[in-house]
Image: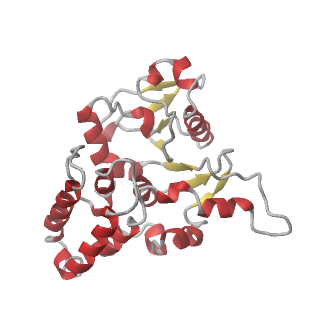
Amino acid sequence: MRLLEIDDRGRLRFTKDLLDEDVPPYAILSHTWGEDEVTFDDMKDDESSKSRAGYTKIEFCRQQAQKDGLRYFWVDTCCIDKANHTELSSAIISMFRWYRNAAKCYVYLPDVSVHKRKRNQDTPEWESAFRQSRWFTRGWTLQELLAPRSVHFFSREGDCLGDRNELDQIIHTITDIPLAALHGANLSDFSIDERMRWAAKRNTTKSEDKAYCLLGLFEVVMAPLYGEAEHAFIRLKEVIDRSSKVLTPKQNIHAGESRFSTALTMVVHSPE
């Protein structure tokens, strides 16, 4: 795992690749990708990185990490060298664990503003925008919602809207994810088809990512093979099937094969 380190003057630099046992406390960013993100190579050039629109969220993460007393943070756009296929594959497999182990997870919502309020109403305007945020429609953000111990949501201005527990009722209404799961219950407490339904209305840019983004949710490992398209779901079903054989009968995939297949079909055919 490669982190961004904030030096004593507030400047950013990459750490070396760290083994799990050597990783210091860190913050992690959850967001949706835009068209002008800062890449790993961009971060080698200070002028190039800061000229990109995506640097705003990196700067937000830096400032918030400092407020929380954290010297290190991780952002997927720039902390992974995506030109290195081995590194990218390893990152995809490790992603759930990285979010789970973070000291803080910051959800940055550029489509939610705190400066707009409804007149003569107690409910802030941001709540309506929050319910409609693109973040709740993306495949990768499902694990980013559920894996971390601490999840805080922020507006585009960088103001904290609340944490996952404080906003649990709203999030439950948006996602249909049970409150117990939002409060940190073991995901294996929920049936395979139920977890699959949580992802049914979410989408990804690449069709394969609809499968890859669920690996952590089902606690399985599968090497990414970009270009395999919907075959990724065949492989996902196979690894979940194999994994389920060591679970209790309640969780065994064969006990709910029809429901699981239906839920999987919903994910496969969710909109791009």
Can you say which quadrant of the picture contains the N terminus? top left
Residue at image location 54% in from the left, 48% down from the top: 106
In the rendered image, which quarter contains the C terminus? bottom left
Q: Position of residue 94 (x, y in %)?
A: 30, 46
Residue 3 visible in the snapshot? no
How far from the left and from the top, in percent, is residue 191?
Answer: 30, 75
How many discs appear? Answer: 0
The spot of residue 23 in percent (x, y) is 37, 38
| Residue shown at 22% from the left, 79% from the top | 258
- Residue at 61 percent across and 47 percent down: it is 110
The answer to whether residue 152 is visible is yes
Horizontal and vertical percent for residue 224? 23, 46
| Residue 207 position (above or below residue 81) | below
Q: Is residue 91 above or below residue 147?
A: above
Residue beneath the point at 56% across and 18% down = 47
67 or 42: nearer the viewer = 42
The answer to which of 250 and 71 lies nearer the viewer is: 250
Left or right: 42 as drawn, with respect to 248: right
The image quadrant of residue 237 is: bottom left
Colour setup of the view: secondary structure
Q: Say left or right for 144 vs 217.
A: right
**On the picture, is 169 further left or further right than 33?**
right
Q: Nearer the viewer, residue 174 or 24?
A: 174
Of residues 28 and 123, the one drawn nearer to the viewer in this rendering: 123
